[in-house]
Amino acid sequence: MLRVDPGQRKRLIEIIHSLTDRFEEAKLNGWLGEAEGLQVSLQAASKKLIAMDQAHAQKAARITDLGLPQIRQL
């Protein structure tokens, strides 16, 4: 799976808004094939945004406390 640069999150949201507008326009005009294709693209973009958010949350949750080192006597 390709990972999206987290810095491009804002752009991905803009793409989702644009796809939503185009999908609504296609439905209003009765362009069924176009609407179906846009819906597929919209679902893929939404899944990518969710995956990006989940990856960011998991990365933040991976901090592990290793404790203080102990000096052992030989």
Image (cartoon, rainbow, N blue to C red):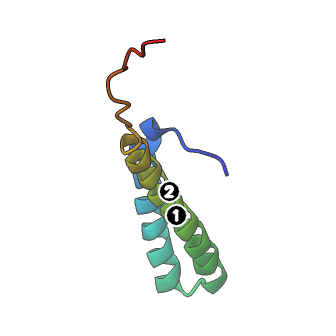
Residue 30 vs residue 36, the one in the foreground: 36
Secondary-structure class at tag 1: helix
**Residue 3 in picture, x, y percent from top left:** 59, 45
Residue 25 badge: none
At a point 44% along the width and 69% down the height, the residue shown is 20
Query: Left or right of 71: which side holds 44?
Result: right
Discs 2, 1 touching: Cβ within 8 Å: yes
**Neighbours of disc 2 within 10 Å: few (<14), some (14-19), many (20+):** some
Residue 47 badge: 1
Residue 43 vs residue 15, the one in the foreground: 43
58 in relation to 63, above or below:
below
Residue 20 vs residue 67, the one in the foreground: 67
Query: Left or right of 41: which side holds 28?
Result: left
Q: Which residue lies furthest to the top in this view?
A: 74
- The residue identified by callout 2 is 51
User: Which amino acid, by three-letter code, is at mark 1?
Assistant: Lys
At a point 45% along the width and 60% down the height, the residue shown is 50
19 in relation to 70, above or below:
below
**Residue 24 in picture, x, y percent from top left:** 44, 77
User: Which amino acid, by three-letter code, is at mark 2?
Assistant: Ala
**Residue 49 in picture, x, y percent from top left:** 46, 56
